[in-house]
Image (spheres, rainbow, N blue to C red):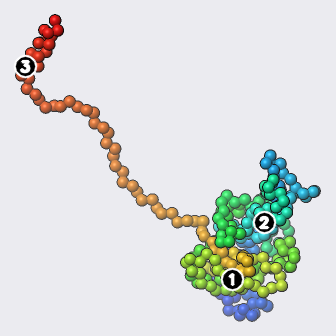
């Protein structure tokens, strides 16, 4: 997903004081919200128990044993998601009594957008490759499931003058809430070259905070700006922490041409061409040998 907006419309919203933004949503906030609605999906993954013979088991009349839900952030080439969503049995207390005899197996998945209230059937999140982010609770997954749609990553160091977008839900309802809200405000920060995490002040709210994403507006051309993803903001202990992401597109050095050398074939052995004067001595010796043999 490559979302490009007019710079004029973004800058127009930056002049609105923070106090006013709590009452009146600025034009730039609306653009950030539009980008987030396309770049974040709410996911639910169901799983069954599977024994060593390949048999699968659910609970009662349910089509699954248990499930987990969470949000995943789409990125160019894959997505970012918590371990509890990719493999829901790993943090499910209901699975623990069966762990020695059964393994978990994804059975069905459902998704909905941030501003939707309906769950629709989807393909399971089963990445081809994943890399653990700091804390080992979230993963940056490489997958072609979403056909390359997602946020372009901002992996550069230095000062960021971006937007924090928090996902909030009504208490005790979580992702099943029909009133999932986005809380958006500006935040600047300096990210050093060796920093893979940054502590973020938490959001004071009566709602349950599910997490956040940090987006940085980048000018991509004349009159155009793009919101790039610096990383998700997740709960680690009592703190909210920004997890920095690394680009899948690793720089590859161009191979230098090698020097080719011809292979020399072994030359056949040849007799000496040095001329030796025949004195007749050899002929006399051969004639004497024949006479002695008679």
Question: Helix or strand or loop: what does disc 2 sit on?
Answer: helix
Of tags 2 and 1, the one toward the viewer is 2
Instruction: Report the number of discs.
Output: 3
Name the residue carrying label 2: 91
Q: Are marks 1 and 3 in contact (CB under 8 Å)?
A: no
**Residue furthest top as drawn:** 294
Q: Position of residue 7 (x, y in %)?
A: 63, 83
Mark 3 crowd level (few <14, some 14–19, many ≥20, 10 Å Cα): few
Sequence-first disc among 2 and 3 = 2
Using the image, tell me which numbered label, if any, was put on residue 59.
none
Lower sequence index among marks 1 and 3: 1
List x then y, in percent, for residue 17: 71, 93
| Residue located farthest toward the right when viewing the structure as drawn | 61
Closer to the N terminus: mark 2 or mark 1?
A: 2
Residue that numbered label 3 is attached to = 280
Circle 2 packing at 10 Å, graded few (<14), some (14-19), many (20+), is few
Percent from the top left, x then y, of residue 111? 80, 66
Quadrant assignment, res 73: bottom right
User: Which numbered marker is on residue 200?
Assistant: 1
């Amino acid at each position: 997903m490559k979302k490009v907006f007019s710079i004029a419309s973004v800058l127009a919203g930056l002049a609105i004081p923070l106090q006013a933004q709590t009452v009146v949503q600025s034009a730039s906030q609306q653009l950030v919200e539009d980008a987030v609605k396309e770049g974040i999906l709410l996911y639910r993954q169901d799983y069954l128990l599977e024994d060593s013979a390949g048999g699968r088991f659910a609970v009662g009349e349910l089509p699954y044993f248990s499930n987990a839900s969470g949000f995943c952030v789409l990125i160019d080439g894959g997505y970012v998601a918590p371990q509890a969503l990719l493999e829901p049995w790993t943090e499910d207390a209901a699975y623990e009594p069966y762990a020695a005899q059964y393994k978990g197996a994804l059975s069905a998945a459902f998704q909905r957008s941030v501003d939707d209230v309906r769950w629709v059937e989807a393909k399971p999140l089963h990445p081809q490759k994943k890399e653990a982010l700091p804390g080992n609770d979230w993963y940056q997954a490489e997958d072609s499931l979403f056909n390359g749609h997602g946020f372009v990553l901002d992996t550069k160091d230095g000062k960021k003058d971006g937007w924090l977008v928090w996902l909030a839900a009504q208490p005790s309802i979580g992702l099943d809430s029909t009133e999932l809200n986005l809380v958006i405000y500006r935040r600047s920060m300096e990210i050093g070259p060796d920093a893979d995490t940054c502590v973020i002040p938490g959001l004071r709210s009566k709602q349950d905070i599910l997490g956040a994403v940090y987006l940085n507006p980048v000018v991509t051309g004349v009159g155009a700006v793009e919101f790039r993803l610096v990383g998700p903001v997740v709960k680690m202990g009592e703190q909210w922490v920004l997890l920095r992401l690394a680009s899948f597109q690793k720089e590859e050095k161009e191979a230098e041409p090698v020097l080719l050398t011809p292979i020399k074939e072994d030359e056949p052995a040849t007799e000496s061409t040095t001329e030796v004067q025949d004195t007749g001595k050899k002929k006399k010796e051969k004639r004497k040998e024949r006479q002695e043999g008679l």
